[in-house]
Amino acid sequence: MKTLIIEDEKPAARYLVKLLQEEGIEPLAMLNTVKESVNWFQNNPEPDLIFLDIQLSDGISFEIFEQVQPKSSIIFTTAYDEYALKAFKFNSIDYLLKPINKTDLRNAIGKFKERQSPVVWDAFQLQSLLTNNFDNKYRERFLVKVGANLKTLQVDQISCFYSKNKGTYLVNENREYPIEQTLGDLETQLNPKEFFRISRNAIVNLRHIDNITSHSGSRYQLFIKNLDEELIVSRERVNDFKIWLEK
């Protein structure tokens, strides 16, 4: 069976490869973006089955099919519950919520093997779904690695995101987890009513701000629950920050 993985979260992609290998399946490739996926389809034979994440770093994965129309079957992999039922409109065999369960994966592959009829893509339906149902969808979960395991964290459990030492981290309770996204990526994925980028180095969750005090240079210092990192609202963001607090 020829399979392809399109997934922008590297820990999730590597974990899926591991699970597939345990089923005796070696994926043809792991792709991370819409652009990379389009290029791959234009230069390679179609796989039998695609494991497709819905939200990629450079757009919604359905944008791939505006440029190429593979007849491969699809198993959606997603951290977004609201996408699950919509996925079945597009000839998907199944959908898998991350972190992917080994039994669920095996069952989804079984459904694929039992399928007899070829996949017929409706490009107009794809475009309609992309335009009407996927606008303004914000991230609900993040996948993090804990030792050899993966776990999901709801966004409301995350107190802040910050960058240091050329890496990006999210904070849950008193623990930080490295993630693949940049703060720039996160700004487009998080609900702006709940999250605000206070500086080049940090994004905070309104629900987790314990206290705000004055700081030098007409700035503010934020105190976040279970966080020792010093978080300062940059001078150029102070006015927007005050407006955000009042919304």
Image (cartoon, grey):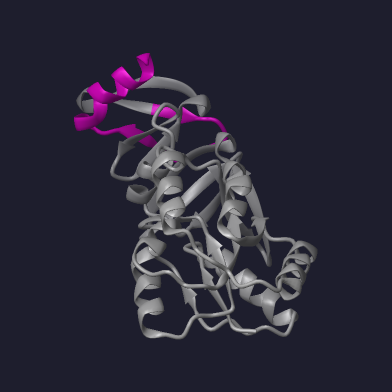
Up/down of 208 relative to 197, above or below: above
Quadrant of residue 136 in the image? top left
Residue 103, position as x, y percentages in the image:
80, 65
| Left-right relation of 109 to 89 | right
Compared across the picture, whether 91 is left or right of 213 comes to right
Q: Nearer the viewer, residue 17 or 47?
A: 47
Q: Is residue 246 magenta?
A: yes
Relative depth, front residue between 155 and 198: 155
x then y, percent, for residue 228: 50, 39
Magenta stretch encompasses residue 2: no
Residue at 36%, 42% (x, y): give it. Answer: 187
The C terminus sits in image quarter:
top left
x then y, percent, for residue 196:
37, 32
Tell me: residue 189, above or below residue 68: above
- Asked whether the viewer can see residue 243, the reply is yes
Q: Is residue 150 above or below residue 17?
A: above
The span shown in magenta is 222-247
Residue at screen point 50% across, 57% down: 178
Question: 44 or 34: which is nearer to us?
Answer: 44
Relative side of 122 to 13, left or right: left
Specify whether residue 228 is in view.
no
Indicate whether 200 appears above or below 196.
below
Outermost residue on the top side: it is 246
Residue 34 horizontal/vertical position (percent): 38, 64
Quarter where residue 37 is shown: bottom left
Residue at position x 54%, y 66% in the image: 120
